[in-house]
Amino acid sequence: MMVVVVGCLFAFFAHAEKHGIAIKGLNHPSIQYLNFNPQYLHVTVRVGLITGLITLAVTEGIAIGRSFAIMKNEKTDGNKEMIALGFMNIIESFTSCYLTTRPFSKTAVNFNAGCRTVMIVVMGFCMMLTLLFLDPVFGYTPLVALSVIIKSAMLGLIDYKEMIHLFKVDKFDFVICMTAFLGVSFISMDVGLMLSVGLALLIALLYVARPASSMKNPTNAVNFAAPRSFAASFIADCKETFFPDDPFQKLKHEKPLPKLKKTIQYFIPLFEWLPNYNLRLFRYDLLAGLTITTLAIPQGISYAKLVNIPPIYGLYSSFVPPFVYAIFGSSKYLAVGTVAACSLLLAETIGEKASPKDNPTLYLHLIFTATFFTGIFQTALGFLRLGILVDFLSHSTITGFMGGTAIIICLQQLKGVFGVKHFTTKTDVVSVLRALFLHRDERQKRPKLFWVSAIAPMIVVVVGCLFAFFAHAEKHGIAIVGDLKKGLNPPSIQYLNFDPQYLPVTVRAGIITGLIALAEGIAIGRSFAIMKNEQTDGNKEMIAFGFMNIIGSFTSCYLTTGPFSKTAVNFNAGCRTAMSNVVMGFCMMLTLLFLAPVFGYTPLVALSAIIMSAMLGLIDYKEMIHLFKVDKFDFVICMTAFLGVSFISMDVGLILSVGLALLRALLYVARPASCKLGKIPNSDLYRDTEQYPGSSPIQGILVLQLGSPIYFANTTYIRERVLRYIQEEQGVSDSKTDVVEHLLLDLSGVSSIDMTGIETFVELRRILVSKGIQLKIVNPRIEVLEKMTLAKFTDVMGKESFYLSIEDAVQSCRFSLLSNKTTTGESSNDIQTVV
């Protein structure tokens, strides 16, 4: 204030504006300038949401109000604060104001000045008088004075001490802090905030996806050992996240030569099963390989049609990839090939940038490029041990996605069934049905070939080819596949297109289809392996799929993975090893060399029938009903994917479903489960009183169990929930015997904690002390105890307040209660004696 007053006086008497010192005037009314033009609406909405989130969730807002309320052992209602801040900004936007919140500096001054109620009204009246009478005076304020005020205020916001504290206690929290700091400083405010929040949520999701586990501690006391170094804890976390199977554990005591041999076998599974291969196994694999070839030929042609590329490339895609998978794949039963869902998704994504009709050559080259990026993405995930990403595609999402995909693929095939020539390139149900209705006059008038049905894919193709050849079906208006040239796959590496104009769409198509192909292929391989009590390595499968697609993109193949239908046939045909894929590869080689032209007579209606019959099996309505009965939220996730894929688009439906599944996971993090524990009669066990009504509470002692990591997202909820437990406990009876004197927090299920969580425990302890309640911690995990030690929380609490088991803590609290009663009784007797 002094800077402004002095600056105004100087500017007024010295006529500063005449000497080049700018003068700041007051705002003019602007309600008439509110702009809801759609051209600018997305910017204003984005700015409003981001700034609104900052004012609510970061230091300026609810957190500041709660911080000062805790100092007086009071609390504020976050939801009421949100409503108040919201109404405040809505009304202000109509009265020439811009966004306001509760700044730290002003709140601190208000608190230290001794405020008792919401007497900020006084400030409002003072501002009204200022505007009525002193308004022109502040017009002489030099901008340099305002700059000095802003700089002096901002320097106080750089809390370097807290940053150093974060670095000492939790390196991950420090990285999140510095991401926001550097992102805001060097990029932009919204990007820095989003990167920091995204990183924090990613770490939370990683702890959800890789929950910690431990063996029982054989000792009978909490181990307050010195915290591990950051390098040691970081290596342990990375090992548990990326190497949960610990593949090299069994190689530690091996000699160099056997160790090298087993290492090669680990990375190239072919060398593991091939030395023990024999003729007996080959008989089963030969039969299985011949069987899946009969399925690979019609499916290859059909799915190539689905992706809008020449059918011969579907056959090419069943020749080279099986050999690659046989070398690097870990599943005995998986049969590789093209799949309908990824084929249609490739067509939809690449079709946005290049038309398969107007520029088929460019379109084909972009398909190869997308396949290349799929391979790079899958290989990178495998080498970086990031199979965890595939785990975020839940079973519900895959079920709904496959069902929705089956619906739109079946509808797409109505083009071939009805012989419609002009058709939509969109994949949603509404667009397909509209195209069929608008072009209904193009439907075939002669349905004499519609008796061809999908009895079995190969039979349909063979019968269709023979009939089309002898009846000259193409002369009667029946569309056929067309010319298929003999010969093996030509090289296509020279056709990969890395033009920046098309790079975004090929990368996007490669990543999305690669993720779906991995989820489908790995899940299918694991499903059939489980039937034989075997297991597959997800990271090896990623590397195998990646190499398969990289080499495939060099040899005129498009995306391949492990389709369910082909794998099921391979399994039921009795395959024993990945040699069945080699047999299929040789059969496809013979087909390409000698029989390819024969399949050129295949009627398109036969391919449509094959695709539709295969797709109907993907609509797993029984699983959807099962999800509805067991878990309604999983059912909603499934139907989101199903309806999103069917009525919007494949990528949007998938993103919506995955987003909803992740939101559910984050809600479980933000609202963790907790329960009140009681003692099971005639035992030392303490269990949830709601689940076990026979368990008995302990007089004067409240035992609570927390069951999830404690993070910034759930700390407020945990604090409020604990306080509510205490209120509920004390509200059962008005007698003083039911007053809670000890609170025991069982942290056995808390695998991790961040700095916000530790600060919450500090605040909770301060509140409990004011209520006369002692806080005790039971069985903190090593990660939690290390951070508490580094943050000096163990010193604040006292090591005597940490216990290894609930029973130990209860006995200690009972002794304390008994001692207090004895002391109180002796004091009363002394008083009576004196009287």
Image: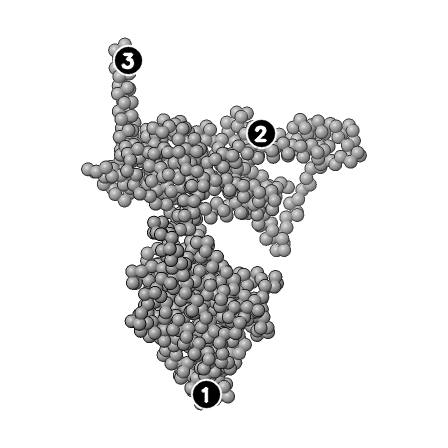
Asked whether the residues under the numbered discs 2 and 1 touch, taking CB atoms below 8 Å apart as contact, a structural biologist would say no
Q: Position of residue 213 (x, y in %)?
A: 34, 45
What residue do we see at 40% from left, 66% from top?
Answer: 326
- On residue 469, the disc is 1
On the rendered image, what quadrant is the N terminus found in? Answer: top right
Looking at the rendered structure, the secondary structure element under dot 1 is: helix
Q: Amino acid at mark 2?
A: Val
* Nearest to viewer (mark 2 / mark 1): 1
Task: Name the image quarter holding residue 357.
Answer: bottom right
**Image quadrant occupied by the C terminus:** top left
Q: Who comes first in sequence, dot 2 or dot 1?
A: 2
How many marks the image carries: the answer is: 3
Distance of mark 3 from mark 2, alpha carbons? 52 Å
Location of residue 149 with respect to 184 vertically, above or below: above
Name the one closer to the observer, 774 or 806: 806
In the image, is 36 to the left or to the right of 293?
right
Q: Is residue 88 above or below residue 503?
A: above
Q: Would you name the residue on which mark 3 appears?
A: 831
Q: Is residue 384 visible?
A: yes
